[in-house]
Image (tube, grey):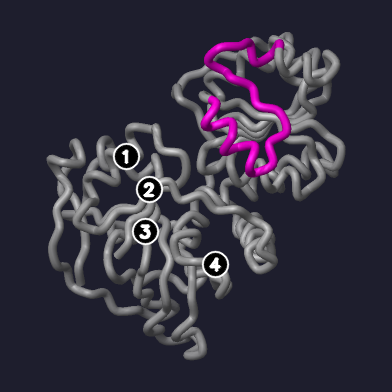
Amino acid sequence: MKAAWYSKNGEAQDVMQLGDLAQPSPQAGEVLVRLATSGVNPSDVKSRRTRPVTGGLIVPHSDGAGVIEAVGAGVAASRVGQRVWIWNGQWQRNLGTCAEYIALPEAQAVALPDGVDFAAGACMGIPGLTAVQSVILAERMAGDLRGQTVLVTGASSAVGHYVTQMVRLAGGRAIGTVGSEAKAEHARAAGLQEAIFYKTESVPDRVKALTQGKGADVIIDMDFASTARWVTEGAMAPHGQLVCYGSNAPEVGLSFRPCLWLSMGMKFFLVYDLTPADRQRAQARLSDMLANNQLQHSIGARFGLAQIAKAHQTVEAGQTVGNVVVDL
């Protein structure tokens, strides 16, 4: 099968290789998926640069979409021919989705409605599940979001774009941070009601102005390194709740007393490591939204397999609005 891989860490143009690898066979409990698309996420390029390579080579990427071509023992034959999207394709394993085929446990291949194309399917594993789990946790902590103000940090990002839509579907008021007017327009098209330009204005001051001094009831956060400071400067309402799935710095200082006086709650999660119950709930809700055509999907750039280095460089540059997808 055609595939892209790397055998050592480094820059994409230096380490990515193209060629043929042996086509996998589905083992008991597994399905074999003929992939149409592979999603490229920031975690994929970070792994290529820094995570030690074990087992000889890594076929990157955890997200993808395609059609089941064969099944292993114990898997219903009726799944053959089913359109699916993939989650955790390369999580704690060497062979990810940047190849023509992937064999993996059948639970990791989720039915993709006929009306959703494979490019959108390649955005579900990390961006889609992170977004829906963020909103589920926000509801668990803060209750019904209807009428509540939710600050979405990085509202134009791959995850933030879905979070914004899901907050609006849940009846919440979505405000969010963006880095440019173009990104603001992208987020507004997804339902963002107020854009906050974090590069040129004070986020806490703007949030207070938009909430009559109260602060946001909920913050769904992609960068705790910045937000940890904002919550103590007025961006968070008393008894507010913060759900966080990322940080641009590994160590973050937090001022205890303001958090105490806010009686605020915080929840961190890793989308790769959801509990089985949480993943089941998240997948069910995401599948329902897909089936009912309730989500906008944003594909910012598409590349062929031969352009894999360029695809990684595009994600690293961070300038593309929308998800980066490789067509296989």
Sequence-wise, the earlier of marks 4 and 3 is 3
Q: How far apart are the alpha carbons under marks 4 and 3?
A: 15 Å
Q: Answer few, some or many: residues within 10 Å of disc 2's Cα (few below 14, many 20 plus, some between 14 and 19).
A: some
Q: How far apart are the alpha carbons under marks 2 and 3?
A: 12 Å
Foreground pick, 275 / 12? 12
Foreground pick, 104 / 220? 220
Tag 2 near tag 1, CB within 8 Å: yes
Position in image of residue 173 (x %, y %): 78, 35
- The amino acid on which the numbered mark 1 sits, given as a three-letter code, is Thr
299 displayed left or right of 255 = left
Compared with 128, 114 (above or below) is below
Tag 3 secondary structure: strand
Stretch in magenta: 181-205
What residue does disc 4 label? 116
Position in image of residue 184 (x %, y %): 58, 31
Q: How far apart are the alpha carbons under marks 1 and 3?
A: 15 Å
Select label 1 or label 3 by which is in front: 1
> Could you say which disc has been placed on residue 314 in the image?
1
What residue does disc 2 label? 301
Tag 4 secondary structure: loop
